[in-house]
Amino acid sequence: MKTKKELVIELLKKNLDGLTIIEISKKLKISRNTVAVALAELKGAEQVRIRPIGKAKLHYWKGGRK
């Protein structure tokens, strides 16, 4: 079974236009807090790019193939 972080990575790879935390949590049916934790880990590993648009933040995959 895949970890929640792996599910977030897969979703970001498929959605090249970027996604907000709320969009990710709705699509994966996991809590926003869980998504935020996974994204924070990915950002720390420099695998995710974040672009603020107004109050929202779009998250993009920029990591390698893994």
Image: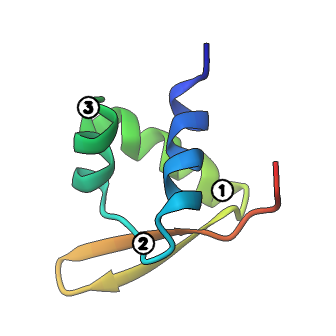
50 left or right of 13? left
Mark 2 highlights which residue?
A: 18
Asked if disc 1 and disc 2 are in contact, CB closer than 8 Å, the reply is: no
The reply to whether callout 1 and callout 3 are in contact (CB within 8 Å) is no
Q: Residue most toward the top?
A: 1
In the image, residue 45 above or below residue 29: below
Q: Amino acid at mark 1?
A: Gly
What is the distance, in whole Å, between disc 1 and disc 2 at their CAs? Answer: 18 Å
Q: Disc 3 marks which amino acid? A: Ser
Q: Is residue 54 left or right of residue 37?
A: left
- The foreground one among 62 and 56 is 62
Where is residue 32? Give x, y as percent.
26, 40
Residue 40 placed where, x, y %?
Answer: 52, 51
> What residue is pinned by disc 1?
44
Q: Is residue 44 left or right of residue 27?
A: right
Residue 54, how many percent across, how many down?
19, 86
The mark found on residue 25 in the picture is none
Looking at the image, tell me whether mark 1 or mark 2 is earlier in sequence order.
2
Which-is-in-front pick, marks 1 and 2?
Answer: 2
The residue under the point 22% across, 52% down is 22
The single residue placed furthest to the bottom in the displayed view is 54
Looking at the image, residue 37 sits to the left or right of residue 23; the answer is right
Spatial distance from mark 2 to mark 3, Cα to Cα? 18 Å
Q: Tell me the element at label 2.
A: loop
Query: What label does residue 31 carry, if any?
Result: 3
Q: Is residue 16 above or below residue 29?
A: below
Which of these two is toward me, 17 or 37? 17
